[in-house]
Image: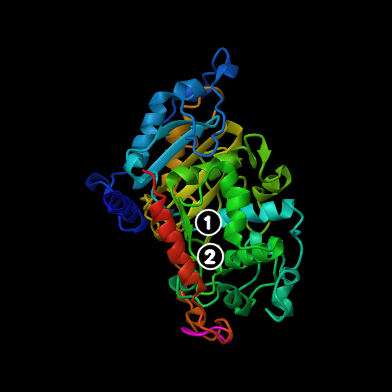
Amino acid sequence: MGRFTARLAGVLAVIIGTSGLLVPTSAAAPARAEAPARTGTPASTEIPADPGAATQCALPGAGEAVRRAKPEDVNLDPAAVREAMRYANTHLRLSVRIHRNNCEVGTGALDPVTQGAPWNVWSSTKGVISMLTGIAYDHGKLALDDPIGKYLPAGWGDRAHRAITVRQLLTETSGLSEAILSEAATTGTDANVVRQALALPIEHRPGTNFEYSQRTPDLLGYVVQRAVGEDLQEFAQRELFGPIGIPDNSYFWLRDRSGNTYGYAHLFIPPREFARLGLLMQNNGSWQGRRIISDDYMNQARQPTTTNPCYGFLFWVNKGQRCVTADIPSERTLDRRMVPSAPDDMFAQVGAFQQNNFVIPSLDMTVSWTGLGGDLAPDPQAMLSASPGADLYHEFFRILLRGVRDRPVPDPGSFPGDTPNLDVNPVNYLDPRVLLNGVAAAPDCNLLVCNGTVPTKGALRNAQSIVNALAGYRP
């Protein structure tokens, strides 16, 4: 019992999610650290005599740790890595892992405590749904421009809802009414998130308008499940997590009461394993010579879309010169890239409170971190961790990238700040019509009964997977 109790205590300390119990007192109200300006000849322009001599690490197999290297072995200035880590550690980052050339070159101060404990990566879960969609696409199980009605049970959704395409779900352009907080408020008590999504009003012509919805990736996860013909989580473990060395007892992923996997959030995964997903993307979907996700899909997934140049297939992307934000506290359009201090080929998984995998293919660099926010800009959206990129991202990458020695990385200067949008309509993110059994909730479902039965499958499977993750906990 002593060993299990220790495991339980270690995991629960982190699973709490937003309690802040692991944040040092000194980090509770961090002072903003300004990135030193790159003056004169920046370190990033100092190209070694033999850049090809940089260490390249092999990706790890199951049960193996990511290989480590010194920053200087991968053409990074150790002082810049240390300063970037110091910035992250004092900005509410509970775990930080910096990789270059598949080598781990730095970890955060709290990683020895947090690295093995399942942690809710919130909307970074959406990126996992995108990866699973890509695998199903590669296997010929679905086509991106198929109407989702091809995969839904008969009688689920009307003609207009069934005509929404897979691509429109991937790009958050389904046209469905969205209310982010209402959609998230009932986690664990939702009778059936798929039926709810199919009952939501269509407020925009599909494909024409970006709205950051929670129900959209829930619906997409179900479509993938129907297309591949097996439970989504079983498919994920066999085709995605297992091949890159993420064991099935290291994480848990919540379901609604009917057993549908949440697609918008609630993948609880240890930071150590979360980073492997970033490394898979860094390697364009390949792991140890095995193709997990095709070049074709990966290349599409990280391209800007016309409705939001800052968004791809459930990933935020840095190529677009304009960003449409989520509707918390109000949607706005930013006339800038997501992270101006990073190369434009960067793309990222972005979750609430800043759970991120940042991938920079041109630098062969991945940064993976988890935490409790950290933006200090006087901007309600940034402070609510709802901006696709604010001062936390910008200043961290200014510090880190000035240490790149084998190619120049321009420095755009300090974070310019964004003009807040104070035109707030609470119904846009807290809509009683979709709360519990409101008028736009799933038909034939209420707090107790759905489709004539009392759904308990999801609760039972949630309990089973949480116990499984507790038993499998490794510090």
> What residue span does the magenta drawing correspond to?
444-450
Residue tagged 2: 262
Within 10 Å of disc 2 (Cα), the crowding (few <14, some 14-19, many 20+) is: many
Residue 245 highlighted magenta (yes or no): no
Residue tagged 1: 125
| Amino acid type at mark 1 | Thr
464 on left or right of 3: right
> Residue shown at 49%/38% (left/top)?
63
Q: Main secondary structure of the magenta part?
A: loop
| Amino acid type at mark 2 | Tyr
Residue 72 in sight from this viewpoint? yes
For the view shown, which residue lies furthest in the left direction? 25
* Residue 53 percent location from the top left of the image: 57, 16
In contact (CB < 8 Å): disc 2 and disc 1: yes
Residue 42 in sight from this viewpoint? no
Of mark 2 and mark 1, the one earlier in the sequence is 1
Q: Quadrant of the C terminus?
A: top left
Q: Is residue 209 above or below residue 6?
A: below
